[in-house]
Image (cartoon, rainbow, N blue to C red):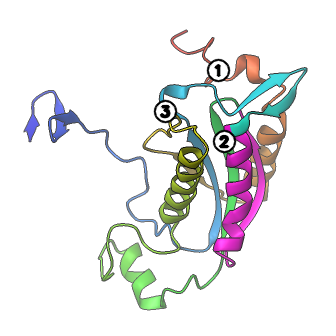
Amino acid sequence: MINNTGEYFQDKYRVKTTRLSHWDYASEGLYYVTICTKDRICCLCNIKDDRVYLSEIGKIVHEEWLETPIIRPDVLLDDFIIMPNHVHGIIKLPKNNDFDTQKRRDAQRRVSTREFGPLQPKSLSAIINNFKGSVKRKCNQNDLAFFTWQSRYYEHIIRDEDDLAHIKKYIANNPIKWSEDRNNPININV
């Protein structure tokens, strides 16, 4: 249902996607992602003296992040950091990610020829959803069922070596700059 105040789906306001409509998110490349906890609740770690001290949930997040290339051997992980209410990481998807050239060209022309559902296997979305789901399952198994993720995540396609260097520096300095971070609850709504 659509009304004059915005788009609605099942009586809930629906935010338009930030994904590039012409980009195939299963294609080769480096992707920078940020995944937040629901309502940005700080439950993954504490930061003291610019160092990260993982909580029980944070330890599960750490384990499951490192499991990603074991579950999906063609995926590589680069720098990452677990913060109190979010995770930053760099994911590399390989060349020839099991999709033929014709399907890639069709995706670039915004023509869908895929025969599977909205989540492409081996796509960035599938990887993130798998990670988030595995963390939630482990939390449920360890009496941490209250934990949940925000429904979406932020991604950025890394364009070149300068972009990569800037993101790696940002990830490394994130604990040091936590007091200034926009995801820090003391800075929200400021």
Q: Which kind of residue does numbered mark 3 sit on?
A: Lys
Within 10 angstroms of label 1, few (less than 14), some, or many (20 or more) residues? some
The quarter of the displayed image where residue 111 is located: bottom left
Residue beneath disc 1: 184
Left/right of residue 135 with respect to residue 63 in the rendered view: left
In reply to whether residue 61 is colored magenta, the answer given is yes
In percent of the image, x 45 and y 44: which residue is there? 152
Q: Which kind of residue does numbered mark 2 sit on?
A: Val
Residue beneath disc 2: 87
Estimate the x, y position of residue 41 in percent, counting from the top left: 56, 25
Position of residue 106 relative to residue 154, above or below, is below
The quarter of the displayed image where residue 37 is located: top right
Estimate the x, y position of residue 73 in percent, counting from the top left: 69, 78
Estimate the x, y position of residue 40 in percent, counting from the top left: 54, 27
Q: Which kind of residue does numbered mark 1 sit on?
A: Asn
In percent of the image, x 53 and y 74: which residue is there? 122
Quadrant assignment for the N terminus: top left
Quadrant assignment for the C terminus: top right
Task: Give the mark nearest the N terminus, 2 or 1.
Answer: 2
Range of the magenta residues?
57-83
In percent of the image, x 51 and y 45: which residue is there? 153
Residue nearest the observer in this picture, 152 or 139: 139
Residue beneath disc 3: 38
Work out how far the residue at label 1 is from the one at label 3, CA to CA, in angstroms: 13 Å
Disc 2 and disc 1 in contact, CB within 8 angstroms = no
Residue nearest the observer in this picture, 180 or 67: 67
Work out how far the residue at label 3 is from the one at label 2, CA to CA, in angstroms: 12 Å
Work out how far the residue at label 2 is from the one at label 1, CA to CA, in angstroms: 13 Å
Left/right of residue 51 with respect to residue 3 in the rendered view: right
Within 10 angstroms of label 3, few (less than 14), some, or many (20 or more) residues? some
Q: Nearer the viewer, mark 1 or mark 3?
A: 3
Disc 3 and disc 2 in contact, CB within 8 angstroms = no
